[in-house]
Amino acid sequence: MASSHLTQSRFPILGIPVHLLTNTTQTLKDRLADRQGTHVVTLNAEMTMQGRDRSELSDIIHRAELVIPDGAGIVLYLKLYGKRVDRVPGIELAEALLDHAATTQDSIFFYGGAPDVSAQAATIMTAKYPGLQIVGTENGYVNPDDELCDRLQKLQPRMIYVGLGVPRQELWIDTLRHLCPDSIWIGIGGSFDIWAGTKTRAPKWLCDRNLEWTYRLYQEPWRWKRMTALPKFAWRSILYRITGK
Ligand code: UDP
C-alpha cells in the first residue's frame, strides 16, 4: 500500500495523528512484502498526553509511517467526531504478524523486557508458531551499545519488536531505525511479559467495557501516577470537541 494512502488516512487526536485504516494487519503484511520500512506506533491516551508535553515524542509520532488506535480512549475520542474505528491492540497486531511471518519466513528480533523475558517469549512464540524465525533477542536493561547495533545491522531482521515502554521505545526506534531501513519496527510495551507469562492481560470482559486500565492498576499499583493522564485526556478531549482548542 502506498505511503500516500497512509498520509490521507491520518486524523488528529488532540494534535497527535492516528491512522484510520480498515485492515491494519493486511497493510503491514503488504508493507513487509514490499520492504517498505515502517515505524509502527501504538497510540493510547497516556501516550497522547505525553506527546502533547514532549515535542520530541510528538515529532516522532508525526514521522512514524503508521500510528494505530491501540487504546480505548482513542477509539472513544474518534467517536466524538463520528468516526467509528475498531481498536487495534498492539499486542494482537504484533502476534498476528508473528503468525504471518511463520509462513513467510520473515525474520524477527525481540528487544526489551527484564533479563530472559524476551528470550522466554521467543521460545514460547516459536513453539506456538512453528517455522517462526526469531533470529535474536536482547533484554531491555542493557544499553543499546555498539554490539547490539552491529547485530541488528548484520542480521537485518525483517521485523524488530521493541518492548521498552513509552516513550523509551519510540525514541530508541527513531534513533536506530536507519540501521535496518527496510524493516518494520514496532514499539510493543509490555507484550514480552505477557507472551513470556510473567504478566497476564486483563480479562476480555474488562477490555470490552473499556476498563483494561483498572486491571493494569491492580497488577501494577505504581502506575497510578501515570494513569492520572487518563482523566486529563478525557477532559481535554471533551473541551477540545466543544471549543476546538
Ligand atoms: N523495560 C525495559 N527497559 C527499561 C524499562 C522497561 O526493557 O529500561 C521493559 C519492562 O521490562 C516492560 C516494558 O519495558 O517489559 C514496559 O512495559 P509497560 O507495560 O510499562 O509499557 P507501556 O505501558 O509504557 O507501553
Image (cartoon, helix red, strand yellow):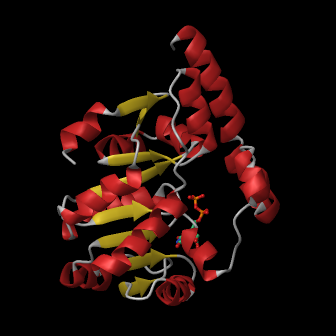
Is residue 162 found left or right of 230 in the rendered image? left
Judged from the image, the quadrant occupied by ligand 1 is: bottom right
Residue 223, image x, y percentages: 72, 56
Residue 45, image x, y percentages: 59, 41
Residue 129, compared with residue 222, is above or below; it is below
Residue 68, image x, y percentages: 44, 47
Is residue 35 found left or right of 147 in the rendered image? left
Query: Residue at 39% of width from left, 56% of height from top?
Result: 25
Is residue 222 found left or right of 83 in the rendered image? right
Q: Residue furthest top?
A: 243
* Frontmost residue, 68 versus 119: 68
Residue 133, compared with residue 55, is above or below; it is below
Which quadrant of the structure image shows residue 203? bottom right
Query: Residue at 52% of width from left, 56% of height from top?
Result: 166
Let me know if residue 131 appears in the view.
yes
Q: Residue furthest front?
A: 103
Q: Residue furthest right?
A: 218
* Frontmost residue, 160 versus 95: 95
Query: How many numbered marks have been drawn onto this rendered protein structure?
Result: 0
Residue 163, compared with residue 197, is above or below; it is above
Which quadrant of the structure image shows residue 59? top left
Residue 53, compared with residue 146, is above or below; it is above
Is residue 216 found left or right of 47 in the rendered image? right
* Frontmost residue, 22 versus 13: 22
Let me know if residue 108 appears in the view.
no
Residue 41, image x, y percentages: 42, 52
Query: Residue at 25% of width from left, 64% of height from top?
Result: 32
* Frontmost residue, 71 versus 114: 71
